[in-house]
Amino acid sequence: MSTHLTTVAGVAVDTRHFIGGERVASTETFTDVSPIDGSVLAEISRGTAMEAAAAVAAAKAAFPAWAATPRAERARLLHAIADGVERRLEELALVETTDNGALLRSHRRGVMPRVAHNFRFFADWLLELDHEDFTTRGHTNHVTWDPAGPCVLITPWNAPLMLATWKVAPALAAGDTVVLKPAEWSPLTASLLADIATEAGLPAGVLNVVQGYGSEVGDPLTAHPDVRRISFTGSVPTARHIAASAAANLTPLSLELGGKSPLLVFADADLDLAADLAVEQYDNAGQVCLAATRILVEAPVAEEFTRRFTEKAAALRQGDPREEATDIGPTIHPRQLEKINGFVRRALEAGARAVIGGHRGAGQYYAPTLLTDVRQDSEIVQEEVFGPVLTLQTFDDEDEAVRLANDTRFGLAATVATGDADRAARVTARLVAGTVWVNCFFVRDLKAPFGGSRHSGVGREGGTWSFDFYCDVKNTVTAPKGFKDHG
Ligand code: NAD
């Protein structure tokens, strides 16, 4: 076996970059560790400016042919990648769980099928993508979505392959070529994606994967003048840095960032449903950008809501994410655990009360936590924790509910639990968020616009919005036959 292959959960994973259709090793490596038991999974090639430049050059060289490839052929190749994902679904699920600690059962049943769907959806959407021609004083306006060029796609560790392919699929469908940089805490499934794309017959250089740290390989990628789009999912501080780097070349950016989303529970809500929605926020150990981590409950039902919530939360099983019965796995990394612990410790010192949790578990686990007696202007209410930590506050009326809900610098999502459709319409109209759910959570259609307001992001992706971002949208105006007068 090549020294560049490692075996993770029985699956062979190449630890090198994938550039121009070839595997490329760096002289330096970084260590990839499993959050489940701290075991070393791999020594991964650690990219530098050299690999960044090589990957962008490969993407640039492959761009003209890929951009000229007919839509139907691009769509066929995307479906072939989806077939590969489905064929290797079990392997992808096992490797992802071992690498980032999220539940195996979710990877098997929800996440990896969704990865395949990302490719199928954007392949099919591409074939439908059209704008009706319209006329201006007899002249025809014809709108087209032209491929833009090489894209740099940078992704986080909390849902590695799902978030990567949510960008890779529309970019490839659009006729762009790609350099994907996965997060250093969970790089393995991106390498498997490179294998799958090769097996599917994607031409060399159309998809490139470079691995490593943001400061070492991310910076030279985002500052590269040949890059025509940057799509980033991650934290606000990194987004600021990338935006500054992109500014030098005026490279268009899409930023999908953090959140501190509210769950508003009105007294007229189905309280059982509301408690279920609240408990769902512990999914993926709370490491979910969309998580509704601020529970706002109408005062008269706060006690009853809390009773039902704690009963349901007590039934959650925390443990090995590979086991079917587990509901909450470990946090991704000792540094993340320490960060979560620090947030909760400071909140408790400031006077918060832990209704449940409020402490670490064994190993890299953090106990599901609900904090109450928190001030609206406190750190625990204003800042994203990215762990299984929720806060509970009460409100007296609709105005106060909306005021509290909107009173952070974020605006990614909001969830409203109410039995009154008129109230739902009034409240959702006033909430600042990219996505609002009423009496449900996490229902996401790839047709829908997705993104955040304020510090939760810049731009929207999904359906046609993805093509608007990944393409140069062009309007061609043609004069009617025999037309002469330009006056
Ligand atoms: P992060 O910002 O630390 O890292 C994200 C990625 O950026 C990683 O691949 C990292 O290597 C890279 N990076 C870091 N510095 C860079 C630089 N200077 N140049 C280029 N790339 C660089 O975020 P994280 O901790 O991995 O992810 C968690 C964050 O992501 C949370 O804030 C979460 O809310 C957010 N998130 C948002 C969404 C969304 O869709 N809005 C989805 C998932 C996660």
Image (cartoon, rainbow, N blue to C red):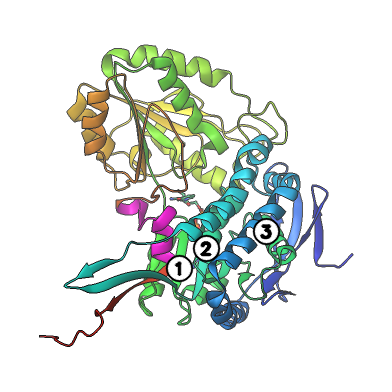
**Given the image, on which type of amino acid does mark 3 rest?**
Ala
User: Which of the two marks, 1 or 3, is nearer to us in this view?
Assistant: 3
Q: Where is residue 305 shown, x and y percent of the image?
A: 39, 16
Work out which residue is located at the far left of the displayed protein and give it.
Answer: 487
Q: List the residue tagged with mark 3.
A: 80
Could you say which is closer to the camera, residue 359 or residue 207?
A: 207
Q: Which residue is drawn at 68% across and 49% down?
A: 99
In contact (CB < 8 Å): disc 1 and disc 3: no
In the depicted structure, whether residue 322 falls above or below residue 92? above
Work out which residue is located at the far front of the displayed protein and give it.
Answer: 482
Q: What element carries label 3?
A: helix
Mark 1 or mark 2, earlier in chain? 2
Q: List the residue tagged with mark 2.
A: 154
Q: Which span is picked out in magenta?
A: 454-470
Q: In which quarter of the image is residue 433?
A: top left
| Figure label count | 3
Q: Where is residue 154 shown, x and y percent of the image?
A: 52, 63
Q: What element carries label 2?
A: strand
In the depicted structure, whether residue 103 falls above or below residue 305? below
In contact (CB < 8 Å): disc 1 and disc 2: yes
Distance, label 3 to label 2, CA atoms, is 24 Å
Circle 1 Cα neighbour tier, 10 Å, few/some/many (<14 / 14–19 / ≥20): many
Q: Where is residue 476 shown, x and y percent of the image?
A: 31, 76
Could you say which is closer to the camera, residue 42 or residue 482?
A: 482
Q: List the residue tagged with mark 1.
A: 230
Distance, label 1 to label 2, CA atoms, is 8 Å
Mark 3 or mark 2, earlier in chain? 3
Mark 2 beta carbon near ligand 1 (under 8 Å) = yes
User: Which of the two marks, 3 or 2, is nearer to us in this view?
Assistant: 3
Q: Quadrant of residue 16?
A: bottom right
Answer yes or no: is residue 187 visible: no
Q: In which quarter of the image is the N terminus?
A: bottom right
